[in-house]
Image (cartoon, rainbow, N blue to C red):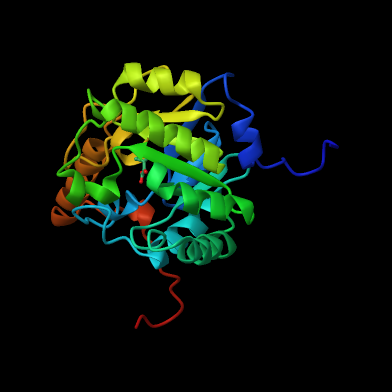
Amino acid sequence: MSATSPVRAVLPPDIRARKGQAPLVVLTAYTTPIARLVDAHCDMALVGDSVGMVLHGMPSTIGVTMEMMILHGRAVVRGLQKAMAVIDMPFGSYEESPQQAYRNAARLMVETGAPCVKLEGGAHMAETIAFLTKRGIPVQAHIGLTPQSVNTLGGYKVVGREAEADQVMQDALAVEAAGAFSVVLEKVPMGLAARITQRLSIPTIGIGAGAACDGQVLVVDDMLGFFTEFRPKFVKRYANLGGLASEAIAEYAAEVRARQFPAEEHSFADVLKGKQP
Ligand code: KIV
């Protein structure tokens, strides 16, 4: 590659090849400005369906639509130069059949420019994952706590304690065998996540799954302190941007009410020629 050629984008096979190397760094992104910040430091930018809760005030991810994912996906892809975009398939867009999943995954990739999709589900989604990967759609799987199933799981609980552990291991093996290039492990006990990571040849990306995973992902608004409705135990808050934004808005409101803003430096002088209007 010459010094003037564009930076080569990261693609799913590159991510797969990172197994056992330096940890993969992933954050969600939903807008171009945040994608630019993520791009500078991360390997992947996940356009998560968490966008529904984080940016649209929805109570869960269930109401997120294909149109929302396409809009946010396009915005994120525009902001990336090196990191790889992964785009979530929303609830109801892939569960019915492999054919339905193919139609919607292809639409997400064509209309956003993302090189792959993520979908929730383990062994029961293996047939769909195999169908997609054999037809040119790289898939990142998502097992353990799968938030789109919150109504059947009965809440956002840890998944994989005691008897459930075997099922989570079977899910991991099934999505790998089906051709997933990586797998997100959400809210899985750390010992089990370590055993899965050891057993699989594809990278595991943990969120609430301990330090042994091949990579880590967080919801960017959680770690920046923008989303404060609730805070899962696995979130470390690296900044309090919500607090800073609130202080700034309060100061603006006070200055407008006191006629301190706008000052002269924010205003435009008249050019007086003859009579004033
Ligand atoms: O939608 C999302 O943000 C996700 C992450 C929590 C992995 O799926």
Question: Residue visible at 42% across and 17% down?
Answer: 212
The image quarter containing residue 20 is top right
Q: Is residue 231 left or right of residue 241?
A: left
Residue 242 visible in the current orientation? yes
Image x and y of residue 27, in percent: 43, 37
Q: Is residue 183 left or right of residue 244?
A: right
Locate the C terminus by quadrant.
bottom left
Image x and y of residue 204, in percent: 47, 29
Question: Residue visible at 64% across and 42% down?
Answer: 11
Instruction: State whether residue 245 is above or below residue 17.
Output: below
Question: Residue visible at 61% across and 41% down?
Answer: 12
Q: Residue furthest right?
A: 2
The image quarter containing residue 236 is top left
Image x and y of residue 1, in percent: 84, 37
Q: Quadrant of ligand 1?
A: top left
Image x and y of residue 155, in percent: 16, 42
Q: Closer to the camera, 93 or 114?
A: 93
Instruction: State whether residue 215 is above or below residue 176.
Output: above
Q: Closer to the camera, 76 or 47?
A: 47
